[in-house]
Image: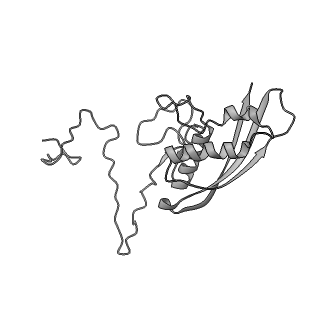
Amino acid sequence: MPPTPNGKNDPNSGFRSSGERLFGDLSTNVELTEAGTLASANVSPTPIGIQTPLRLSADVGPGTVVSGPQEVFSMHFDAGDQVSDNLRNLIKTNHGERLGQPDFGANIRPLLFEMTPEVDFEAEVMQRIKTATAKHMPFVNLVSFEVAIDNRQTSPGLATLGFTIGFDVPDLDIINRKINVLVTTGG
């Protein structure tokens, strides 16, 4: 019989650990008040995911050795921030960039050199975003889309597109969240 976290054997558990505990006892002193709220001050929020672009956590500096249950990279603690980050990464990823998922992403960068009046550019960009979101993040409802084409004089052969996307995630009570995305490519 495999042991449970408290060291006792659990006959109903099919899980058997082959390693050792990395962080010791992770239990906390949590008590609920009569109102059902947490009464302990030593409970820290649970990280949801890593922030991108990657950066070291404020607790970890160069040369620091991580020897406990702390985060090496900056983390998201809010579901809305994590969904925003994931959606931004989905939109900025092109087909073939994600190992093992060749069709992951909205594949917008190839369109940047096709910004002509003959092509309904904004409709094509939004269609690609809708398709990628429906496939990889179906819980997100896209609400609005605004394009801001960068016409500044930049380096020759450099194309930049900025846009704002509004979205909702009803299951997480995220309403009218907006993200700004900037896609740049050179050729």
Seen from this angle, which residue lies furthest bottom? 34
Residue 40 or residue 136, whichever sits in front: 136
**Residue occupying the point 47% across, 60% down:** 171
Seen from this angle, which residue lies furthest top? 187
Horizontal side, residue 45 vs residue 156: left or right: left
Residue 40 or residue 85, whichever sits in front: 85
Q: Quadrant of residue 69?
A: top left
Return the x and y of residue 131 as percentages of the image width and height: 56, 44
Q: Does 110 appear above or below 169?
A: above
Return the x and y of residue 66 as percentages of the image width and height: 45, 35
Seen from this angle, which residue lies furthest front? 118
Horizontal side, residue 43 vs residue 15: left or right: right
Return the x and y of residue 88 as percentages of the image width and height: 61, 44
Residue 86 visible somewhere in the drawing = no
Q: Does 62 appear above or below 1?
A: above
Horizontal side, residue 187 vs residue 71: left or right: right
**Residue occupying the point 55% across, 55% down:** 80
Residue 49 visible somewhere in the drawing = yes
Horizontal side, residue 94 vs residue 164: left or right: left
Return the x and y of residue 156 as percentages of the image width and height: 83, 26
Q: Quadrant of the N terminus?
A: top left
**Residue occupying the point 62% across, 35% down:** 107
**Residue occupying the point 34% across, 65% down:** 31
Residue 86 or residue 41, whichever sits in front: 86
